[in-house]
Image (spheres, rainbow, N blue to C red):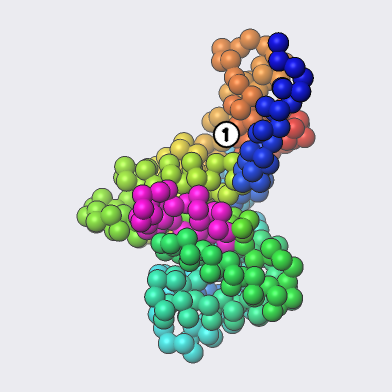
Amino acid sequence: MLTPEEIDGFVTALSSVDEERSSRYPGDRLANQPVHTCYVPAGQFRPDIVAHWGNTALATLRANPIEATDTIRARVERKLRTQPIEDLRIDFEDGYGTPDDDTEDADALRAARALPDTPYVGLRVKSFDTAALRRRSIRTLDLFLTTIADRVPPGLLITFPKVTDVRQVEVFVTLLERLETRLGLLAGTLVFEIQVETPQAIVDSVGRLALPGFIAAGQGRVRGLHFGTYDYTAGLGLPSASQHLAHDACDFARHVMQVSAAGTGVWCSDGSTNILPVGDPDTVRAGWRGHAALVRRSLDHGFYQGWDLHPNQLVSRYATVYRFYRDGVAAAVARLNDYLERRSGTVADEPATARMLASFLLRALRCGAIDDTELPLRQDRLAELL
């Protein structure tokens, strides 16, 4: 028999591993992840953008039938009236272009002065691809943050696009630290998302997965990994007809994102489709069906957030999200009850699956797919499982 001292030696030998794992993988940050991010070019931003998107989507929904139950349709209408946008990003990158400096300065100031009251809001700066873009990106971010320094919203997020090298992340973190100091903000106030839209963001120049290094270089500031459909597929050389979210190449990138972010508390978000539900009724309905299929595919693959580029996509986004959760609630409750009561049901779930069942139900509540009255399990009981 081993002595207690010998056993203690083996246990102690791994204590540093425990500490490193806890630091690097604090656990999933499930609470309050938005179901989407809406991108609005800075030149098109307006103070009433949230109401404008909601009213546009409501008008389109009322003028066109959608494949949804009365319950889901009512919930979608309520969402469009009360909180049509959960996460707004004012875009100074691809959707905006490269106007002259005076124009971008003015747009950065105008946007910062009229930030809407959404749970999450922020800007996408230009990439660090070239010296000229870096300079403009830093200036826009500086102007924007200086303008809101005395009223930084708690849900402020910055999107950092087209990352190709871990050193870009390191410099961006240093920039955020400098801005916090200069503006008198608490350390750690400024957080950001990394856009995964280059092949080099998946595999680096020496053949390693790049994203774990990006997250580590973020020093706790990375809140999300957002997939960029079109830049990524174009970077692989795919023909235009193959540049879409359902391509196998995109699945590979998303799997790498999930594996890299698992347990870190970093959210993963899927990308967008540029097939918009606009035009005549047949085209609108076709656009909704296509968008809904992609949203459902993302949800089935564990991506609970995605991009929306047009107000009308809010209809298919919320209808699909609500149906996804409402279709799964009864089974999730039954399996979780069996697990909690130690009953032998048709499925023998492990603790890890029980945690995901609980997170599924909490997500359903948070996004508005169901109400407390429809859930026979208390939220605090669900939270205990996470």
Q: How many marks?
A: 1
Q: For residue 363, which quarter of the picture?
A: top right
> Magenta span has 212?
yes
Q: For residue 247, which quarter of the picture?
A: top left
Residue 382's place in the image compared with 274, above or below, is above
Q: Quadrant of the C terminus?
A: top right
> Could you tell me residue 159's position as x and y percent?
52, 64
In this orientation, which residue lies closer to the viewer: 244 or 8? 8
Residue occupying the point 46% across, 87% down: 101
Q: For residue 50, which quarter of the picture?
A: bottom right
Residue occupying the point 67% across, 11% down: 343
In this orientation, which residue lies closer to the viewer: 221 or 166? 166
Amino acid tagged 1: Arg
> What span is in magenta?
192-218
Horizontal placement of 384 versus 325: left or right?
Answer: right
Residue most extreme to the bottom: 102
Inspect this view and state whether residue 382 appears: no
> Could you tell me residue 297's position as x and y percent?
42, 40
Q: Which residue is mark 1?
A: 326
Q: Quadrant of the N terminus?
A: top right
Residue occupying the point 64% across, 30% down: 355
Give the SS element for disc 1.
helix
Residue occupying the point 67% across, 19% down: 339
> Magenta span has 215?
yes
Horizontal placement of 290 versus 81: left or right?
Answer: left
Horizontal placement of 319 versus 82: left or right?
Answer: left
Residue 71's place in the image compared with 209, above or below, is above
